[in-house]
Image (cartoon, rainbow, N blue to C red):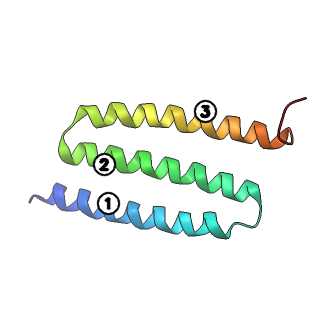
Amino acid sequence: MSLLDWFLVFTLFLLILAILVSFIRLVIGPTIWDRILMINLISAKVIMFMVVFAIWERSELILDIAIAYGIVGFLTITLLSKYIMTGGREK
C-alpha cells in the first residue's frame, strides 16, 4: 500500500468515528432542532466518507451516488424542518 492509500484508510476510520460521535449526540440532543442538525451533520459525513472511498477505489460511480445522496439529504432536511416549523400538518 502506498502512502496515499494509508492516508485514505486513516481518513475513512476517522470519518466512521465522527459519524458514531454524531449519532451519540443525535440520541442525547435535548431539542428536536439539535437532532435535525445532527442528522444533517451525519448526512454530510456520509457524503465525505463516500467521496474518500470513491477516491480509494478509483470509482466514478460512487461519486455520482454521493452527489445524488447529497441532493436527497438536503431536500429531506429542508422538508423535515418545514414540517416541524408548521406544527405538523399544514392547515
Q: Say which amino acid is labelled 3.
A: Leu
Q: Residue at x 61, y 37 (%)?
A: 76
Image quadrant in which the N terminus is located: bottom left
Q: Position of residue 33 (x, y in %)?
A: 74, 54
Q: Say which amino acid is labelled 1.
A: Thr
Do the numbered discs 3 and 1 sit on residues whose CB atoms are within 8 Å?
A: no
In this rendering, which labeled residue sits more in front, label 2 or label 3?
A: 3
Residue pointed to by mark 3: 75
In primary-sequence order, the first of circles 2 and 1 is 1
Q: Position of residue 77 (x, y in %)?
A: 64, 41
Q: Say which amino acid is labelled 2.
A: Val
Callout 2: SS: helix
Callout 1: SS: helix
Q: Position of residue 57 (x, y in %)?
A: 19, 45
Q: Quadrant of residue 23?
A: bottom right
Callout 3: SS: helix
Residue pointed to by mark 2: 52
Q: What separation in Å lies between label 2 and label 3 (alpha carbons)?
A: 23 Å
Image quadrant in which the C terminus is located: top right
Do the numbered discs 2 and 3 sit on residues whose CB atoms are within 8 Å?
A: no
Observer-nearest of 75 and 54: 75
Q: Residue at x 69, y 66 (%)?
A: 29
Do the numbered discs 2 and 1 sit on residues whose CB atoms are within 8 Å?
A: yes
10 to the left or right of 75: left
Q: Position of residue 53 (x, y in %)?
A: 28, 48
Q: Residues within 10 Å of mark 2 (few under 14, many from 20)?
A: some
Residue pointed to by mark 1: 11
Q: Residue at x 69, y 35 (%)?
A: 79
